[in-house]
Amino acid sequence: MRAAILISVLFAFILGAGLAAVKKDVTGAPALATGKQLFVAHCASCHGSDGKGQHAPAGLRSAPPDLTTLTLRNNGAFPFARVSGTISGDLSRPEFVNRQMPCFGLILHDADDLNRDESHTKIASLTEYIRSLQVK
């Protein structure tokens, strides 16, 4: 029992460190351009080029969420940590047990990037691009 608690605490610490590292300072046109490029390559096939999720491929168990209303659904604040954690797969959420969306933290990870800095920067850029899609 004690070992299980220790493992849970260590996992939560590692997970928290991973999420904190994703919150990188990536702003401006270069980050948005990188984020858009990643979105087109990895997200648009399910979420649509506009992020509304209305043209998902057949065979999905449920429609992808509308990414343009995340701020509205979060009381006016863009949920950066939740979005980047969802993208990377670092966020532990009950609905991820049967998740349809790939863990892009693994997909965007370069084997030579031992600290995952590059993948965190890509995820942060992608998250900033999704922030730019929010309806006003």
Image (cartoon, helix red, strand yellow):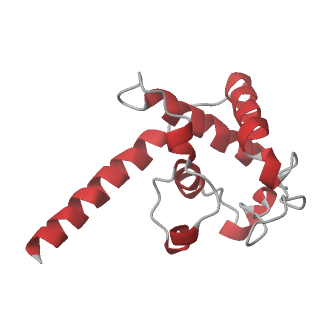
State the residue in front, 21 or 59: 59
Q: Position of residue 73 (x, y in %)?
A: 72, 69
- Taking the image as drawn, is residue 25 in sight? no
Residue 71: % across, % down: 71, 60
Relative to 74, does residue 68 appear above or below in the rendering? above
Q: Quadrant of residue 63?
A: bottom right
> What residue is rendered at 76% in x and 63% in y?
64
Instruction: Note whether 28 is above or below 60 in the view shown.
Output: above
Q: Name the residue rendered at 50%, 74% in the picture.
A: 94
Residue 134, horizontal then vertical, whole percent? 79, 53
Q: Is residue 19 above or below residue 119?
A: below
Answer with left or right where residue 131 lies relative to residue 1: right
Identify the residue at horizontal 44%, vertical 29% (top origin): 117
Q: Determine the image quadrant of residue 113.
A: top left
Image quarter hosting the N terminus: bottom left
Pick the quarter of the image with the C terminus.
Answer: bottom right
Name the residue located 49 percent from the left edge and 33 percent from the top edge: 109
Q: Is residue 66 left or right of residue 76?
A: right
Determine whether, in the image, residue 116 is placed left or right of residue 37. Answer: left
Q: Left or right: where does residue 34 sit relative to residue 89?
A: right
